[in-house]
Image (cartoon, rainbow, N blue to C red):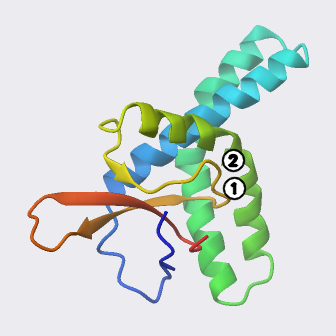
């Protein structure tokens, strides 16, 4: 995991937005599976369990990623509740991190990522291009918008 603090005052040209969306959708799908198992354990109807798995990635794409980025921007500009909104999204996505981490370890070509942690308390994970000296290949690493 990179310790680089990617802020809105920096140039975000290094971000691979396609990889970022794919990684965050995988994270949301993993979180949806874990939340669905939790709901099933609470005797939720099977339609609710299936809806959680299917809607979690869509909701994160439509709401979670934009709100997470906006929350970080608000927190960076001094708005006190900005960090709270981002933290809420981070907690909702946290159960998906181990599944993505294990997938990256078991199938390294699935994401072609360097770094990553078992748990990452951040609303949005960014995939950034890493230039290696003497190499023409592009490598990618996981960064958080908060630097955490």
Against 112, residue 73 (above or below) is below
Q: Which residue is labeled 1 in the image?
A: 90
Q: Position of residue 69 (x, y in %)?
A: 56, 67
Mark carried by residue 44? none
Q: Is residue 65 visible?
A: yes
Q: Secondary structure at mark 2?
A: helix
Q: Position of residue 10 (x, y in %)?
A: 41, 86
143 and 105: which one is in front?
105
Q: Secondary structure at mark 1?
A: helix
144 and 92: which one is in front?
144
Rendered residue at 11%/65% (across/down): 135
- Quadrant of the rendered image containing residue 45: top right
- Quadrant of the rendered image containing residue 37: top right
Furthest toward the right, the residue is 42
Rendered residue at 47%/33% (across/down): 103
Rendered residue at 40%/44% (across/down): 22
Characterize the local packing of mark 1: few (<14), some (14-19) or many (20 or more) Cα atoms within 10 angstroms: some
Total tally of numbered discs in the picture: 2
Against 5, residue 118 (above or below) is above
Q: Position of residue 145 (x, y in %)?
A: 54, 70
Furthest toward the top, the residue is 46
State yes or no: discs 2 and 1 in contact (Cβ < 8 Å): yes
For the C terminus, the image quarter is bottom right
Q: Position of residue 65 (x, y in %)?
A: 55, 56
Q: Which residue is labeled 2 in the image?
A: 94
Q: Is residue 58 visible?
A: no
Characterize the local packing of mark 2: few (<14), some (14-19) or many (20 or more) Cα atoms within 10 angstroms: many
* Disc 2 to disc 1, C-alpha distance: 6 Å
- Quadrant of the rendered image containing residue 123: bottom right
Against 54, residue 40 (above or below) is above
């Amino acid at each position: 995991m990179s310790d680089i603090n990617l802020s809105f005052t920096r140039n975000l040209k290094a971000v691979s937005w396609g990889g970022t969306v794919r990684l965050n959708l995988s994270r949301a799908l993993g979180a949806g599976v874990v939340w669905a198992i939790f709901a099933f354990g609470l005797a939720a109807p099977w339609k609710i369990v299936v809806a959680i798995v299917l809607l979690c990635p869509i909701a994160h794409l439509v709401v979670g990623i934009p709100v997470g980025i906006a929350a970080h921007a608000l927190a960076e500009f001094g708005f006190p509740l900005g960090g709270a909104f981002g933290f809420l999204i981070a907690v909702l996505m946290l159960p998906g991190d181990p599944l993505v981490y294990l997938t990256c370890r078991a199938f390294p070509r699935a994401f072609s990522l360097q770094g990553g942690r078992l748990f990452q308390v951040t609303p949005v994970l960014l995939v950034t291009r890493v230039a290696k000296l003497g190499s023409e290949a592009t490598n990618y690493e996981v960064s958080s918008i908060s630097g955490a």
